[in-house]
Image (spheres, rainbow, N blue to C red):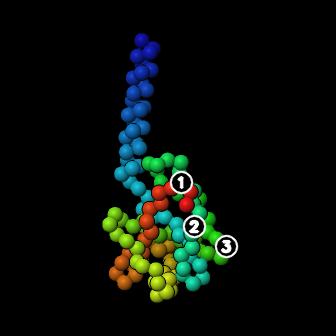
Amino acid sequence: MKLSILLAAGALSLGAGIASAQSLADNPPKVTTMCLDVAGISRAATCKAQASRLDAREDICLCPLGAQQVQVSVCPTGVNAPAESAAFARARLKLVNKGSLVGATFEGQPICRPARTALFQ
């Protein structure tokens, strides 16, 4: 009797865990972190993500000394970020609003970054 109750409870919790993992896989992060130097040039951010392939949200991101940490949209599937250029770097620096570039565009293209795929990047 006790064994059947434990097995039923285990099956229910496993089913709930799978449903939760599936919802995370269907709902990837919409923003990521980038670092901009004083000229608006993108510098590499070092971010620690969740220890899960299903939940790619970032916990902590650090920028190199002198770079500004900025939130930016993750590029939707099939959309590429504008090509790097001096004009884009200047415009990107001017478009930062309260540490965010979410929703900003450059020459009609959304300013975005590809989603991070590794645990540490």
Residue plotted at (53% across, 48% down): 51
97 or 77, nearer to the observer: 77
**Residue 108 in the image: above or below residue 55:** below
27 sits to left or right of 85: left
Sooner in the amino-acid sequence: mark 3 or mark 1: 3
- Is there any visible trace of residue 109 in the rendered image? yes
Q: Secondary structure at mark 1?
A: loop
Where is residue 7 drawn, in percent x and y?
A: 42, 21
Q: Amino acid at mark 2?
A: Ala
Q: Amino acid at mark 3?
A: Leu
Residue plotted at (57% across, 67% down): 45
- Is there any visible trace of residue 91 in the rendered image? no
83 or 100, nearer to the observer: 83
**Residue 20 in the image: above or below residue 39:** above
- The numbered mark at residue 119 is 1
Spatial CA span between label 1 and label 2? 13 Å
Q: Amino acid at mark 1?
A: Leu
- The numbered mark at residue 45 is 2
Where is residue 28 drawn, in percent x and y?
A: 41, 56
Q: Quadrant of the C terminus?
A: bottom right
Sooner in the amino-acid sequence: mark 2 or mark 3: 2
Spatial CA span between label 2 and label 3? 11 Å
87 or 9, nearer to the observer: 87
* Residue with the most extreme left position: 78
Circle 1: is it few (<14), some (14-19), or many (20+) Cα within 10 Å?
Answer: some
Residue plotted at (40% across, 81% down): 106
Q: Secondary structure at mark 2?
A: loop
* Residue with the most extreme right position: 65
**Residue 46 in the image: above or below residue 4:** below
